[in-house]
């Protein structure tokens, strides 16, 4: 199991935004987190990405207890990448944005070039390598953000509403890229959406959240077809 | 011709001919102001980072104190530092009074709050997603701080430029702690005050022109750097 979550709660200003008694996430497959705005999807992704601690509860990541302390999290964050709903690009070129994760891991220059080029190829953005990242459209930004996450070969890719801000053409492109990532690289993906059909199209399992609580889990994607 | 045009023409001659006295005064001013700006930046930028980054008890009080210090008059700092470095002061034996070092100490205290508060503002203004993105891509705290520094770079450069503009134009600290000794602690502003007292406007106006040119040059540099980043 990739994640085993029990008795997880997140409270903001005395308001419980997430309350999950039990949840298991398997590795190597795509999960969809389905729910309306404010259902707690992004909060759950932030917790799964080790970017914010739960108020209470237990999380096992690959059978190891997650301790939300700076030194421990640093190591875990190098295995899980979260791509935001509206990803922000560093104010530099597309290439340097994608290269960032490799630079901080001190990967040699020639290897970095090879990995970045491959990732940009995968998302169809190679010809934008030297463009200023902040000048890209929403769809292009989302694709570069996926490449930026992919280059560090994460065990898990968390995508927060990856298609909500892009046009139809880019939506199809991004969904296909996500499928390709799991099939070719065996990277586990958890993505949020409020589109049931998108969840069915892409994921093997769906977790529906309503006001922070799971409605039902472990549904086969085929049910919605 | 009137006093202004007479002085202006003579002053321009002085500037063009690079008068030795004038060059010496400008050199002292630039040296002292650059050093105090550098020292204030080396302390103020990390301090601003720390305050912007961390949550700690008393943070609002620290911010209020820093903001209050922005309006501190130079003569108050002059008096304060004087009490420490005067012959009878705690550091009197170091012989700092009426030296360039004394001016640098005073000016550093003057602009430290400027650099720190402007850095805090620059860091606080940048999008919180930069921090989150750096963290999720595996950056440690120092690497995340470098990312934030890069994204806030123009705000931080603006802080340094504002600090330099403040020190090069101040007169109270230079006069009280430097003593206006010719060729040694005479800065552009103290020389201008002295020349005015003497009724000699030519050098004063020439130094005024240079002060404006320095200010203009630095702002031009800043705007060209900012422009280049947008291309």
Image (cartoon, rainbow, N blue to C red):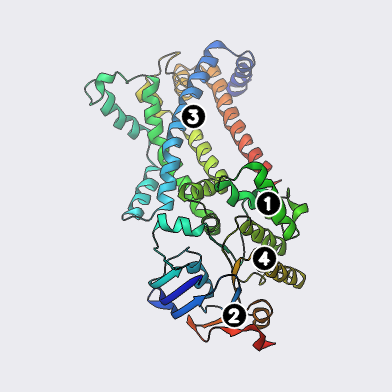
Q: Residue at x 33, y 34 (%)?
A: B76
| CB contact under 8 Å: marks 1 and 2 | no
| CB contact under 8 Å: marks 3 and 2 | no
Q: CA distance from mark 4 to mark 3?
A: 58 Å
Q: Tag 2 or tag 1, which sits nearer the N-term?
A: 1
**Foreground label between 1 and 3:** 1
Q: CA distance from mark 1 to mark 4?
A: 15 Å
**Quadrant that contains the C terminus of chain A:** bottom right
Residue B168, numbered label: 3
Q: In this view of the protein, which residue sits in the foreground, B43 or B96?
A: B43
Q: Residues within 10 Å of mark 1 (few under 14, many from 20)?
A: many
Residue A116, numbered label: 1
Q: Tag 4 or tag 1, which sits nearer the N-term?
A: 1
| Chain containing mark 4 | A
Residue A218 image-quadrant placement? bottom right
Residue A181, numbered label: 4
Q: CA distance from mark 4 to mark 2?
A: 17 Å
Residue under label 2, please give it.
A205
Q: In this view of the protein, which residue sits in the foreground, A85 or A215?
A: A215
| Chain containing mark 1 | A
Expressed as whole percent of the image width and height from the top left, the position of residue A167 reads 74, 70
| CB contact under 8 Å: marks 4 and 2 | no
């Amino acid at each position: 199991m990739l994640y085993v979550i029990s008795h997880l709660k997140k409270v903001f200003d005395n308001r419980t935004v997430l309350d999950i008694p039990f949840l298991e996430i398997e590795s190597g497959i795509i999960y969809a987190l389905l729910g309306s705005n404010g259902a707690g999807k992004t909060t759950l992704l932030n917790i799964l990405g080790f970017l914010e601690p739960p108020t209470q509860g237990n999380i096992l990541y690959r059978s190891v207890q997650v301790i939300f302390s700076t030194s421990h999290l640093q190591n875990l964050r190098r295995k899980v990448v979260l791509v935001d709903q509206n990803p922000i690009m560093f104010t530099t070129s597309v290439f340097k944005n994608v290269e960032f994760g490799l630079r901080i891991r001190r990967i040699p220059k020639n290897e970095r070039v090879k990995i970045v080029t491959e990732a940009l190829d995968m998302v169809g953005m190679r010809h934008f390598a030297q463009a200023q990242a902040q000048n890209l459209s929403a769809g292009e930004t989302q694709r570069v953000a996926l490449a930026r996450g992919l280059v560090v070969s994460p065990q898990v890719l968390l995508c927060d509403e990856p298609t909500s801000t892009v046009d139809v053409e880019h939506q199809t492109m991004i969904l296909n890229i996500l499928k390709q990532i799991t099939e070719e690289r065996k990277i586990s993906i958890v993505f949020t959406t409020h589109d049931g059909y998108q969840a069915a199209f892409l994921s093997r399992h769906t977790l529906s959240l309503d006001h922070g609580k799971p409605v039902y889990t472990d549904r086969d994607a085929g049910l919605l077809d | 011709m009137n006093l202004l045009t007479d002085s202006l023409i003579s002053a321009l001659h002085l500037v063009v001919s690079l008068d030795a006295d004038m060059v010496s005064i400008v050199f002292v001013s630039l040296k002292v102001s650059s050093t105090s700006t550098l020292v204030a930046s080396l302390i103020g930028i990390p301090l601003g980072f720390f305050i912007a980054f961390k949550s700690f008890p008393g943070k609002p009080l620290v911010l209020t104190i820093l903001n209050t210090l922005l309006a501190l008059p130079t003569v108050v700092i002059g008096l304060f530092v004087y009490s420490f470095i005067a012959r009878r002061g705690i550091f009197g034996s170091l012989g700092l009074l009426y030296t360039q070092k004394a001016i640098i100490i005073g000016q550093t205290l003057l602009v430290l709050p400027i650099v720190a508060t402007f850095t805090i503002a620059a860091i606080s203004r940048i999008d919180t997603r930069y921090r989150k993105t750096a963290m999720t891509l595996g950056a440690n705290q120092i690497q995340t701080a470098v990312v934030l520094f890069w994204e806030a770079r123009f705000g931080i450069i603006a802080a340094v430029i504002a600090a330099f503009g403040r020190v090069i134009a101040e007169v109270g600290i230079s006069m009280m702690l430097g003593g206006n000794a010719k060729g040694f602690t005479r800065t552009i502003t103290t020389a201008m005050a002295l020349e005015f007292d003497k009724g000699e406007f030519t050098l004063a106006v020439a130094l005024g022109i240079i002060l404006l040119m320095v200010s203009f040059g630095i702002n031009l540099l800043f705007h060209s750097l900012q422009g280049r980043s947008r291309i």
